Amino acid sequence: MTIAGRRLSWLDTGGPGRPLLALHGHFAAGHTFAGLAPGRRLIAPDQRGHGESDPAPDYSRDGYVADAVALLDHLGLRRVAVLGHSLGGVTAYQLAARHPDRVSALVVEDIGAVVHGDLSFALQWPARAATRPALLAALGRSAPYLAGSMREDPDGWTLTFRPADMVASQQALNGDHWTDWLASTCPALLIRGARSDRLTRGHALEMLARRPRTELVELPAGHTVHETVPTEYAAAVAGFLTRADA
């Protein structure tokens, strides 16, 4: 799919099941949700500047939301359940706020209604290396989180995103988004990693208290709940979506 000359790539499992749009976080790609929600049609895009999707001229909140709407339109999907992790979580609840007729249910993983983050450490990562092991070694302690975000090209191994774009994206993500979190009325599930340093328990409880039709689940993980405890995560999502469908 092309948007204004820019490629947008996505994973689509197809099939007759109810559709679920799944939006990944910074540094990741749609395949991070592969295997989630069997029985549903999983649609997981590589958001702008990530994975196999092209870089974008900007990483604004409006841009991310517009990409999601464009993808739904391209696939002929009027109304879907939407799930998002971190960056994708904010995009998910902003999509529900700005296009309530397109979102039947909302799952937000480990991100709050107020976001403060700094990804400038990524600017120290190498642009490429001769081999995959060499790139992993150069990434140091970040390597385990980036192993799925690397690719080989004719000049060696590189990351599937530009670190400077991720810094710009995080800067655009930062801010107070309470208005968007509270604007939608569809059923919502907030999933928090019990060891998360991104979403405190107090903030999660405030999000729960202030928004009707919202549930909270805490699982034994840090920020990337879906990768750390995939079985428990999938069960929580499946149970919630079944209730939301009913």
Image (cartoon, helix red, strand yellow):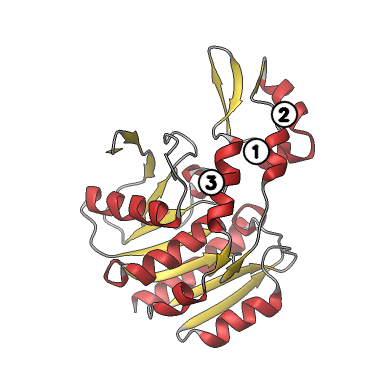
| Residue wearing tag 2 | 136
| Residue, disc 3 | 32
Single out the mark in the foreground, 1 or 3: 1
Q: Residue 122 location, x and y as percent? A: 68, 39
Quadrant in which the C terminus appears: bottom left
Q: Are marks 2 and 1 in contact (CB under 8 Å)?
A: yes
Q: Quadrant of residue 147?
A: top right
> Residue farthest to the left?
76
- Using the rendered image of the protein, determine whether residue 38 is visible from the camera's viewpoint: no
C-alpha gap between disc 2 and disc 1: 8 Å
> What residue do we see at 58% from left, 53% from top?
171
Q: Position of residue 33 (x, y in %)?
A: 50, 50
Depth check, front residue: 211 or 124? 124
Q: Secondary structure at mark 3?
A: helix
Callout 3 touching callout 2 (CB < 8 Å): no
**Which residue, given by chain and number where applicable, does mark 1 sit on?**
146
What secondary structure is marked by label 2? helix
Q: Residue at x 44, y 63 (%)?
A: 92
**In the rendered structure, which amino acid carries the disc numbered 2?**
Leu
Of 54 and 52, which appears nearest the observer? 54
